Structure formats: C-alpha cells, structure tokens
Image (tube, helix red, strand yellow):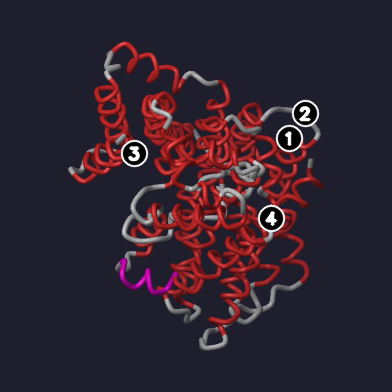
C-alpha cells in the first residue's frame, strides 16, 4: 500500500508536468495523509532541515568554481595542453576531448559545466577536421559525465549527505573508476576512428608543447591541491570547495587576466541560479525521505528483494539495472535524492560496502545524463552545437555502451573499486 502511494503520487505529479521538487513535496504530503500524520509544521521543519546541513555548503562553492574556471580560461588552457600532446594522432581531437574532460572533472564536479565548455571549444575544431558532428557530440557528452565521478564531485556530496556516508572516502574511491570510464572512451573512440576519414592536426613542435604545459601550469596544479588536501586531511570537502572557488577566481583574474568585474558578477549569478535549483531539490527530498523512513518503505522493499539478499553481486546487478532504467526518466539529482533513502537500508542489510555502493550509484546516475528522453547532457551538447537530438543519440551510442559495460564489470568485480580506494585512503 505504502509503495503504491509513493509511486503513484510521485509519478502522477511528474506526469502532470510539476517540477521535481514540488512533486517530492506532494509525494510527502500524500504519504503523511495515508498514515494520518499530516501536519504542515512537519513539512516546514523537514524542508528547512533538508537544506540546513554544513557539508551541503560545498555544493554552491564547487558550482562557483566551475563557473570561474570556464570564465577564467582554465578550461582553454587544459585543452591547449591536450592538443599539444596528442592532437597530431589520428582522431587526436577525440583523445584531446577525453584527456581534457578527465582534468576538468577534477576541477569542477559539474557535468553540465564541463560539457558546455568542451562543446563550445572542440566541436568547431572537430567539424573542421572532418569528424562526424553527431559522433563528436556523442563523445563530448560521454566525456562530460566523468565530472560527477572523478572528485571533487557534487554528486558524491549530495549522496554522502543523504546516505550518511563519508564524502572524503567517496571522493577517494571515485578516482580509479572515473579513469577506467575515461579509458573505455579511448577504446570506443579508437574503434570509431578506424572507420572515419579525418584530418589529424599537425604535430606541435617541442617548444609549443613546453609553452602549452607552462601556460597551463596553474590549471594542472589545481586538482593536485584539491585531491592532495583531502588525502592528507588539510581540509574537509566543504573547505576544499571554498579553496577551489577562491583558487579559480584568483588564477582567472590575476594570472590569466580573463576575469573582470563583469565576468565575476556573471559567474556568481549563474552559480546562484544553479545552486537554488539543487538546494530546493535537496530540501524537498528531506520531506519525502522522512516519510519514507517513518513508513518503513525500505523494509517493504527489503522483503520483496529477500530472495536476492544472500548474493550481494546479483543484488547489485539488479539495483544497477533498476537505476539505469529510472535514469532514463529522471535527472541526476532527483534520482539520487529519491532512491538513496530507499536503497541504502537494502545495501546495508546485504552487507555491501556503502562507499562502494555510493560510487556505483553515482556512476549509474551519471550515465543517466546520457540516456533519452531526459538526457540533460545530450540537451546541452545539442544546444551548443545546434544539431538535432536524434543524431546525437545515435552518435553517443558507442560511448554509452562502453561506459555501461565498464559499470557492470565493476559491479561483478567490486575489487576494481574497493582495492584502489584503500590505496588512496
């Protein structure tokens, strides 16, 4: 009964075109009414408590860091380095995209910001080199979703707060899986390029390579400062977000001299708009989460999945398949906020490492950014490149398949995540 009310109220509100945050509130109110607990004060209190969480301060600062990074020219410097190193290889612009995406992911943690920056800078170059524009857009979209996996990740912060899992441990555990996803894109792009006739870029002379590396020095040092500071306990994830925002602003303004008062103001406004959407979602989800706990919805789900609880690998495969399907209809943040309070008790009861589950869960939700009809990152690429969605969906398929395969390999072999995570800890 409770599961039915939960699904019907949530999906019904979404089907009416209601924003996800309001759909979550409606879902919470319906659950309260069915259980005879309706009280507007409880709704208001949980709404406030949902946003009143110190670790969530990292979200606006990492979003601001991403805006300042793009405005300050750090993204351009990273692409220049990649171009100088691998641009001359056949299909070199694709490898430039993947290399730049991995570095940029370690700076901002926002898939949308990274994808928009990569698309604006690289799609014109890939068109000129003779690459199929739909395939190029697909690669850029698939590379952009590395941002929520490689730390610092806004997705890990939201999941860590919702699940009560160490955000620092999630950050450290996401490094190797993010790189493995990047390597899967390298293989997929290499296979695609075997059938393409494209013009490689001329090999950069040694002096140009050195100039690019020196010019991008401050951008390359950025992830070392963030990851190193977290690894050695210099600062917490929340403090790391502040460091990232200040660093991106100072380098963009004083070193590369691309940020003035106008650019700074625009970055703050854009970050504030994005933050307001994310934080309202988080706050609204707390109302539904509280009711999910009170109604013992996880207990009912555990009873349904009891036959699979004895085999954690099979259970993880089923959960990953479920999340993959949900990701086609829901965006990244709502999926994390809705499913985390339902799935975490199941994961704990089955004896699955919560950090490992968190990494796999965020990878799965990141892939959801590529799956139509929602496919937020696909929409970003289409908007920047001005190409139809249907073509980009075809173009992203080889890279989407590669990332899904890597995800399920890590599901079957958890040591690929847990062993490297122990090294970084």
Question: x, y percentage for residue 254?
Answer: 63, 36
- Label 4 sits on residue: 414
Q: Which residue in the protein does label 3 denote?
A: 3
Asked if labels 4 and 1 touch by Cβ distance under 8 angstroms, the answer is no
Q: Nearer the viewer, mark 2 or mark 3?
A: 3
- Counting other residues with Cα less than 10 Å from the Cα at mark 2, is it few (<14), some (14-19), or many (20 or more)? few
Residue 53 located left or right of residue 203: left
The label nearer to you, 3 versus 1, is 3
Q: Which numbered disc covers residue 259? A: none
Asked if the residue under mark 1 is in contact with the one under mark 2, i.e. CB atoms within 8 Å, the reply is: yes
Q: In the rendering, at what x and y percent does residue 117 appear?
A: 49, 54
Query: Who comes first in sequence, dot 2 or dot 3?
Result: 3
Q: Which residue is mark 2?
A: 234
Mark with earlier residue (1, 4):
1
- Dot 3: element: helix
Q: Which residue is mark 1?
A: 230
Residue at 34%, 58% (x, y): give it: 383
Residue extent of the magenta highlight? 389-396
310 relative to 334, above or below: below
Residue 390 sits inside the magenta stretch: yes
Residue 275: x and y, percent? 43, 32
């Amino acid at each position: 009964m409770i599961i039915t009310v939960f699904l019907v109220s949530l999906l019904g509100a979404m089907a009416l075109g209601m924003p996800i945050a309001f759909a979550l509130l409606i879902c919470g109110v319906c659950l309260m009414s069915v259980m005879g607990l309706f009280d507007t004060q409880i709704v208001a209190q949980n709404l406030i408590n949902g946003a009143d969480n110190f670790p969530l301060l990292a979200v606006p600062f990492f979003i601001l860091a991403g805006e300042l990074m793009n405005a300050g020219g750090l993204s351009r410097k990273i692409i220049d380095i990649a171009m100088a190193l691998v641009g001359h290889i056949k299909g070199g612009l694709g490898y430039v995209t993947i290399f730049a995406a991995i570095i940029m992911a370690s700076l901002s943690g926002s898939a949308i910001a990274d994808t928009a920056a990569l698309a604006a800078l690289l799609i014109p170059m890939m068109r000129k080199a003779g690459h199929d524009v739909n395939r190029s857009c697909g690669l850029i979209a698939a590379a952009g979703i590395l941002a929520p996996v490689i730390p610092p990740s806004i997705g890990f912060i939201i999941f860590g707060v919702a699940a009560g899992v160490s955000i620092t441990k999630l950050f450290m555990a996401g490094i190797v899986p993010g790189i493995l996803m990047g390597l899967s894109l390298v293989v997929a792009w290499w296979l695609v390029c075997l059938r393409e006739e494209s013009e490689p870029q001329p090999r950069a002379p040694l002096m140009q390579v050195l100039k690019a590396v020196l010019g991008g020095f401050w951008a390359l040092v950025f992830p070392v400062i963030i990851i190193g500071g977290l690894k050695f306990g210099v600062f917490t994830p929340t403090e790391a977000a502040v460091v990232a925002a200040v660093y991106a602003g100072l380098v963009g303004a004083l070193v590369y001299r691309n940020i003035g008062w106008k650019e700074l103001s625009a970055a703050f406004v854009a970050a504030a708009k994005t933050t307001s959407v994310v934080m309202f979602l988080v706050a609204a989800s707390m109302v539904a989460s509280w009711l999910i706990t009170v109604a013992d919805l996880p207990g009912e789900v555990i009873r349904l999945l009891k036959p699979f609880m004895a085999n954690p690998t099979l259970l993880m495969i089923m959960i990953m398949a479920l999340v993959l399907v949900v990701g086609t209809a829901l965006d990244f943040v709502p999926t994390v906020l809705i499913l985390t309070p339902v799935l975490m008790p199941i994961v704990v009861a089955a004896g699955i490492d919560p950090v490992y589950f968190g990494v796999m869960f965020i990878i799965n939700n990141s892939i959801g950014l590529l799956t139509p009809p929602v496919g937020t990152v696909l929409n970003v690429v289409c908007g920047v490149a001005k190409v139809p969605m249907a073509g980009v969906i075809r173009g992203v398929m080889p890279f989407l398949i590669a990332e899904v395969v890597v995800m399920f390999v890590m599901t079957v072999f958890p040591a690929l995540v847990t062993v490297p995570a122990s090294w970084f800890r």
